[in-house]
Image (cartoon, coloured by chain):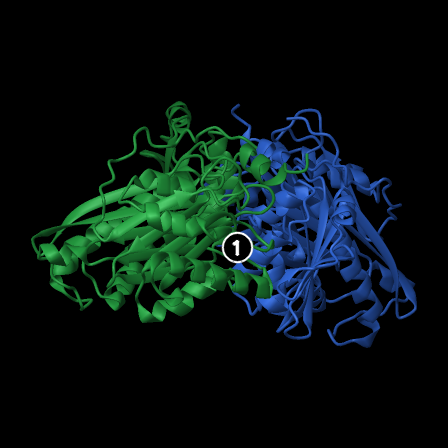
Chain colours: A blue, B green
């Protein structure tokens, strides 16, 4: 199925600088696609630390299990990502494929297999033929360079309609360090893809436990605040690598989570993760509108998140937005079904800056024409105030269109 | 929007007998629709008991709040159901409309307002003009008869494409008693409808607390095992009325939940509730396929239900079924995201009788052609065995088609 680029795609891509200590190359391994790159090899300098956050699925893919096991040592020398086959639910063959891929990559990058991190995205349930990486990864290692990042982002796409990249530059104790991240979205293609992958690299010298802490905290309001359809992939993987190359230019090695010098870096990282997460929502399958949902006045942030996600995952709310209908009744429905503290007669609801409902009924001043005009836009904000407490939360999603159903259901027709 | 009748509609409707002690009539009150009935009045003989189960929404409609409050007394003399306006999220005006409706109905039926039960389905957030019931309900009371039930079922439809009715006859301590039930489905129409209503009447003499116990237990594996889109209405209402008229023919009055004579009646009631619930799934918006999902080998029934519902509510599973794709990878995904005990490498998955996956991988004997043929049918069964325990559960849903999106999102286009 050919798809046009999402109308929510960025108009220009940012300039993506090299990150000292990281080189990479892409190749066509012929896993599933023809005439496009489908494998990415990154090689990291000795001393690179790694942290990761993975799907909470009880049925994770073989690469996810590999990465989780290898993360304990906190060291990385190579990353291999392939698109076209997720190597999920492939049993013993899946574990063998992961091991062989790591061995091939280790030989290519001159490291040990346990220093190789892996991610796969694509078809579930079909064996991944890892022998296809033989030669290909050695060639990648020989060609590896410090750019262009856009090619790395393209090699890991499945039904994504645009590559997702972001970069930040920030001072670490006065020394400029760089962050670059790439991501692929919740894209599906015949017959069964569903994987969110993201990789972030930095030249900042940060110890693995600190990096893990940063990532654990960083995903809460970024990738974990994102939903396309409420379906959690077996392969969701976010890995972050810190080469430490900036130490040569005087950047301090950060070994403690509480190090005050991390403040700016942490903010830049969270900002970058949010940027990538929002790009994933903007490329949700069939997406025509990017939706930001904010719930305030909740009794706790957890409660606000649960209500916001109930709204974001409601097919009725998402189809209403697709239909350009400011259907606040469905928002009330989604608040009500979340099971969290909420009082109907205290609810206030806005679409953008237009207050459509207050105190348990339609706002008498609600302007239908202004609201209709607002709903025609491609950026829709839904705000709900519960008037019960002071906690709030924001999540992102996209609308639910006929194209979503077509992308995910039309294989056989 | 005009819609054709669901391809999953029954070919013939059952013969629906009168239930002694119940009379009813329908009328055109002009709430929202033109040229169709939109109000149903049922009048019950003195001594009729009542039980009810309602939405768990934290933001229920005004009629739901009324019924819940009046249920304590366990007595009913009248039921008023209107379609076209759900009287939900209408604030003070909504409570006033409920009170006025009950007063008009009480005058018409010759009872007290607190003996009147109410349900509304239709638009959310718009005031219901209860004065439209003046005269109409008195006229209904004057015309009330013991049939035809199909007209009662039609008057409460919104975007339902067929009326939902069911009947059972069963002996109560040797005396035949009758059950008749009607339901309306999760239908939406511009701009915001979402209500499941069902009403069951019997001439069996059953005390209100016993009736409530029967209903509470009866919904677990019937209406609560049903999902169209995971969105819970603010108005879901199931009311059951027992006129006791069969006592004249010698049926015993059942005053204890543990009364052994209830066994057959209980089974008939549960069977009838299941019948109605499945009819609702068969008329889910845009439904082309009726899906039965069974999870076995779970550690508890609660766990099996949660996993079955995770599969049933997964947009990716539902679009795959719409696309006639036996996509067991997505079933694994949905099992994995449920958060319940599950081990990937122990899973077995069947579509119909075809085992497509076992022990964490594709079944080597899996016949793609036979599976494709099976998926073209309109009744799809998905079975998952977790191989962890002995608990199982079954839920029903329908596929997710472009028509669902069209019905719920195309108002403005």
Residue appearing at x 37%, y 24% in the figure: B370
Q: How many marks are shown on the rendered structure?
A: 1
- Relative side of A71 to B109, left or right: right
- Relative side of B366 to B250, left or right: right
Q: Please say if A332 is above or below A123.
A: below
Q: To which chain does the residue with label 1 belong? A: B
Q: Position of residue B391 (x, y in %)?
A: 30, 56
Which residue is the site of mark 1? B131
Secondary structure category for the residue under label 1 = helix
Q: Position of residue B317 (x, y in %)?
A: 49, 40
Q: Position of residue A389 (x, y in %)?
A: 65, 75
Q: Please say if A69 is above or below B291.
A: below
Residue closest to the eye, B268 or B313: B268
**Can the viewer see residue A242?**
yes
**Can the viewer see residue A185?**
no
Residue appearing at x 62%, y 72% in the figure: A300
Figure quadrant of residue A137? top right
Residue appearing at x 90%, y 67% in the figure: A250
């Amino acid at each position: 199925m050919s798809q046009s680029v999402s109308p929510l795609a960025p108009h220009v891509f940012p300039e993506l600088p090299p990150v000292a200590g990281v080189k990479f190359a892409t190749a066509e391994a012929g896993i599933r696609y023809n005439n496009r790159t489908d494998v990415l090899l990154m090689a990291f300098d000795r001393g690179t630390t790694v942290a990761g956050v993975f799907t909470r699925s009880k049925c994770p893919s073989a690469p996810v299990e590999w990465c989780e096991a290898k993360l304990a040592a906190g060291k990385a020398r190579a990353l291999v990502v392939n698109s076209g086959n997720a190597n999920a639910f492939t049993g013993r063959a899946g574990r063998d494929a992961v091991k062989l891929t790591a061995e091939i990559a280790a030989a290519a990058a001159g490291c040990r297999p346990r220093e190789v991190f892996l991610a796969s995205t694509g078809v579930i349930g079909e064996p991944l033929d890892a022998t296809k990486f033989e030669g290909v990864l050695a060639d990648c290692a020989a060609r590896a360079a410090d750019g262009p990042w856009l090619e790395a982002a393209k090699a890991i796409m499945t039904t994504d309609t645009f590559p997702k990249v972001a970069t930040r530059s920030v001072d670490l104790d006065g020394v400029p360090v760089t962050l670059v991240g790439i991501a692929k979205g919740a894209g599906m293609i015949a017959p069964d893809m569903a994987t969110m992958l993201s990789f972030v690299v930095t030249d900042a010298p940060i110890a693995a436990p600190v990096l893990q802490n940063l990532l654990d905290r960083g995903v809460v309001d970024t990738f974990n605040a994102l939903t396309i359809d409420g379906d959690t992939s077996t392969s969701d993987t976010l890995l972050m690598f810190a080469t430490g190359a900036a130490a040569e230019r005087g950047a301090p090695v950060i070994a403690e989570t509480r190090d005050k010098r991390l403040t700016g870096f942490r903010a830049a990282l969270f900002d970058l993760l949010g940027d990538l997460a929002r790009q994933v929502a903007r490329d949700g399958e069939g997406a025509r509108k990017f939706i930001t949902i904010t719930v305030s006045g909740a009794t706790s942030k957890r409660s606000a998140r649960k209500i916001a996600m109930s709204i974001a995952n409601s097919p009725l709310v998402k189809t209403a937005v697709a239909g350009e209908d400011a259907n606040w009744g469905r928002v009330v429905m989604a608040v009500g079904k979340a099971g969290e503290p909420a009082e109907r007669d205290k609810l206030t609801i806005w679409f953008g800056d237009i207050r459509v409902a207050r105190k348990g009924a339609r706002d008498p001043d609600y302007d239908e024409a202004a609201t209709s005009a607002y709903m025609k836009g491609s950026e829709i904000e839904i705000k709900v105030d519960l008037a019960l407490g002071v906690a709030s939360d924001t999540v992102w999603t996209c609308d639910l269109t006929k194209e979503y159903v077509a992308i995910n259901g039309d294989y056989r027709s």
